[in-house]
Image: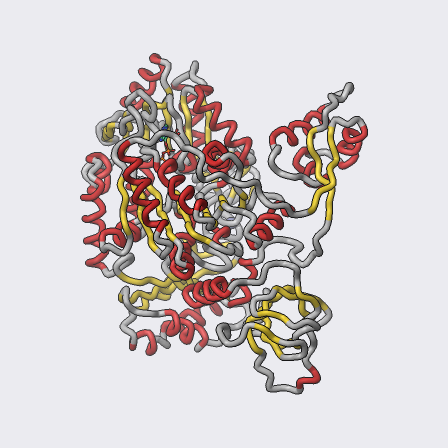
Amino acid sequence: MTRTGEKSYFEAGTLVAVLTAEPINRFLDYKAPEGGVFVGSFVQVPLGPRKVLGVVWGAGVGGFDLSKARPVSQVLDVAPMREEMMVFLQKVADYTLTPMSAMLRLATRAPGLGDPISMRKVYALGDVEPDRITDARTRVLNVLRENKASRLTKKELADLAGVTASVVDGLVKLKAVAEVETPRDTAYPKLDPMMAGLELSESQKTGGDALRASIAEQTYSTTLLKGVTGSGKTEVYMEAVAECLAQGRQALVLLPEIALTVEFLDRVEKRFGARPAEWHSGVTMTERRRCWRMIGDGKAQLVVGARSALFLPYQNLGLIIVDEEHDTSYKQEEGVFYSARDMAVMRASIVGASVVLASATPSLETWANADAGKYKRVDLEGRFGTAELPDMEPIDLRMEEMETQSWISPALHGEVQSRLDKGEQSLLFLNRRGYAPVTVCRACGHQVGCDDCDARMVEHKYHGQLICHQCGETKPVPTKCPNCDVEGRMAAVGPGVERLAEEAEVRFPDAKIEVLSSDMALSARALKERIHSIAAGEADIIIGTQMVAKGHNFPLLTCVGVIDADLGLQGGDLRAAERTFQLIRQVAGRAGRAEKRGVAFIQTHQPDHPVIQAIMKGEEEEFWRAEAAQRREAGVPPYGRLAGIVISGPDLKAVYDVATALSRNIEGLRQIGADVFGPAPAPIARVRGNHRVRLLVKAAKTTHIQPTLERWRNSIKAPNNVRISIDIDPQSFY
Ligand code: ADP
Ligand code: ZN
């Protein structure tokens, strides 16, 4: 659909093609307004009775009565979309089989882009202490103390503090809060790339120099930066950021989790003297708008954000860092199905920027690209300073005398106890949220399921409810069986972290125990504070889900217990081995980060399983090579191509009819050598009342399958209540 590269300016009255963010999969023609427009100009155009946001994409097609064409209503006062960005959006659309309108929505996720430049009032701490302090007032002042760098409006301030606007007004009157008139969007403070960083170790210096050299070339390159947790990767890629900023280009750092951004912002401030722009779901709407505009004006040098920060309108992008590049949160699995890691590489290759993929446990995709010489590779040796990697020790659960309703083996109990005696920290890791995954009736065997999904409800004591992890539906914890009506026989089966904490409290009655799980729904800042106080020794035993595996430092931690190493190996997912390997290595890496050496104890029923063996031996390259050989043999990613197709809808028969029709119409796919598997009910066969059926397309790595897939999807006229979604390079198969 691209029509760029033809003409860049259109005089008033000529026809232009406009891409809108409305779900219409074609360009609309409008007349250029007074003063003309450029390709890439952001505009407002009339659509029916409304005015909608759009981008001038090229010359209009016409073919209709020109006097009927409506003019563009307004050209917006923001930097026009650069051609490079138009190419990027088009390429992502082609790769992921996404309509361009959805791509534009992704690229304009900031409110009020069409508003004129204006002033607004923001709030800061005043210089008078109020003489009468209330709870509500304290909350307002605390929010201002915590958010010194952001510029909060009255509504944002009141919302964050959980008070009414009149509380803020009261404080303004008392001069305890200052009201300041500022332009809505201001440039971000200057970062100084020449400031000295920490003194680097030999290995860090070699790595940093290699990255600087790549960036100095100002052409596309991707480098895998590999080093165990605590090896100082962040310090090394800051060198890359410094080089990029010194060239006057913009840099982007992607992080897998909001909780990590808070700590990262502090590190940037120490390294470059000011805080960078921030982009993720926890950022206020006004701040988002500022971020979007300033990036487009080149007035934000560094952006730290979540995956969607990849679609911001950089003017001069020189570097993208993808930290913890193996993390599954980089894959978006709704709306636009894209991998931020892969699309980062695509964007960089279009603009001649560098990419750094950092991880202790890279994805097999990245490992294979480095192995094949497509990516450069920088390895950091060992850990920074004296810290050493933990020893790994299996605990064979077949040999342990496990008590009923108990998940901590006698051996692990002993190890944790000895750490408690020495005043050291332990971490018990179980990748399951909630209290118990199953609630069963001991009288009839009924398991409580979700009404709308083919999934069991998970008991959460913290919330006092059963929760469906698919759709979020809740139910009270039943005392009477919903199936046989027998009273008092409902029982929780299996552990989640909350239940593990309960067991730990019984076993270690004097220990301070803290649970870290994404259920706690803390703000990024509150979570960071919690993690900080735990890291400083507030807890003796930390109990956590995979959230604790991601990048947090616990220097006092010397013992990690993996409660169920076999959990991830079930299910037959193509990446089960890889994920288990990554997750357990990451968790184990939390131990012994300071002077004290750590040990990771791995509870398993299958100590001889090759994956468990590889984890124990820590011979990573050997593991990757073996895993690579198996995948190559099977012709699956990264050595083959997959596309996952989910057909879903409320009517099971209609869903199956579409799936069957698709599966019978695969001539085109056969011709390009692709195989089609299915239809089969999805592992979770119903979500939110929609039945789900899957097909899987498998092809050789070199096959460009998208155009054929698109024709295939369009060859079937699906009824309105059936959805066909295609996921290229699927990560999950639920
Ligand atoms: P990684 O990203 O590989 O897990 P980090 O960069 O977070 O490692 O480094 C781990 C710890 O070591 C951090 O607390 C960091 O501040 C510290 N560190 C890393 N490099 C240095 C250095 N050159 N000098 C001093 N401290 C360092
Ligand atoms: Zn549900």
Closer to us: 98 or 446: 98
Q: Could one spot residue 459 in this view of the protein?
A: no
Q: Is residue 639 left or right of residue 94?
A: left
Q: Is residue 337 left or right of residue 643?
A: right
Residue 13 position within the rendered picture, expressed as x and y whole percent measured from the top left? 67, 79
Residue 405 position within the rendered picture, expressed as x and y whole percent measured from the top left? 37, 28
Which quadrant of the structure image shows residue 600? top left
Residue 641 position within the rendered picture, expressed as x and y whole percent measured from the top left? 31, 63
Which quadrant of the structure image shows residue 438? top left
In the rendered image, which quarter contains the C terminus?
bottom left
The residue that appears at 38% across and 69% down in the rendered structure is 706
Residue 606 versus residue 343 in the image, above or below: above
The residue that appears at 70% across and 69% down in the rendered structure is 73
Residue 701 versus residue 146 in the image, above or below: below
Which quadrant of the structure image shows residue 560? top left
Q: Is residue 132 left or right of residue 631?
A: right
